[in-house]
Amino acid sequence: KQEVTQIPAALSVPEGENLVLNCSFTDSAIYNLQWFRQDPGKGLTSLLLIQSSQREQTSGRLNASLDKSSGRSTLYIAASQPGDSATYLCAVTGRRALTFGSGTRLQVQP
Amino acid sequence: DTEVTQTPKHLVMGMTNKKSLKCEQHMGHRAMYWYKQKAKKPPELMFVYSYEKLSINESVPSRFSPECPNSSLLNLHLHALQPEDSALYLCASSQVGAGMNTEAFFGQGTRLTVV
């Protein structure tokens, strides 16, 4: 059974810092990996999708990497802003749809 | 348009009520999903529909009954729920393709409270 772990569970940083969120998964037989953002009580907003054959994807200040063989992904956020405060979830697509990690709660202090 | 629309946004229901959650997408996606999310927990898969047919049921109690009347619509019928069923119910959709290299899009969810 696929298990997805995210570290750290919570993170508080001052505005302007660069930061890295980590995601690991136990079964490397995935089709893709997605990073989502979730604001309190809201739905999920897709940030980045990395296909299993790709190593990296970039969107604005966000950069996600994937090392399928070691079962790891990182989300790099450059020059963090208070508006980045949210929970970030990674999810892998395998045989049984998306499996989510438990998320990293990010607080960016002004 | 990458929007998945869920209605209602909030629902309060008694344990003897019957209600339905609705989800709609117009992206031409042929896979649709229901997820349940409790507070401070990740979403958990409930059901998957592929080409309007139920393909995955994650051993969900029969008081939850999914329905996919056409390729754009997904319903979740609720009956005789328990207070522990209170949660955020999320609908998602994606393409169905070779290798399932597709991006999933989620709605804003229905916040369900069972009293």
Image (spheres, rainbow, N blue to C red):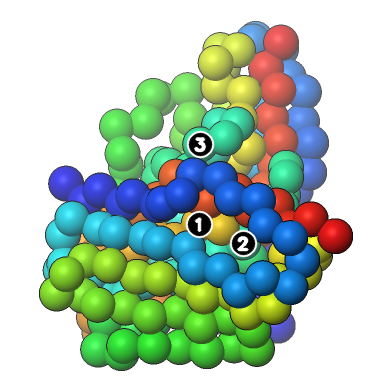
Q: Which chain is indicated by disc 2?
A: A
Q: Residue at x 40, y 71 (%)?
A: A74
Q: Quadrant of the N terminus of chain B?
A: bottom right
Which label number is shown at residue B59? none
* Secondary structure at numbered mark 1: strand
Label 1 resides on the chain identified as A
Residue A79 shown left or right of residue A103 in the figure = right
Residue named by callout 2 = A37
Q: Position of residue A44 (x, y in %)?
A: 62, 58
Residue A69: x percent and y percent? 14, 74
Residue type highlighted by circle 1: Leu
Query: How far is disc 2 from disc 1 in space, using C-alphas?
Result: 6 Å
> Crowdedness of circle 1 by 10 Å Cα count: few (<14), some, many (20+)?
many
Q: Identify the chain of the residue marked 3, using the numbered disc in the image.
A: B
Tag 3: residue type? Lys
Does label 2 or label 1 sit earlier along the sequence? Answer: 2
Residue position marked by numbered label 3 in the rendering: B41
Contact (CB < 8 A) between labels 2 and 1? yes
Report if residue A81 is visible in the image: yes
The residue that mark 1 highlights is A89
Residue A93 in sight: no
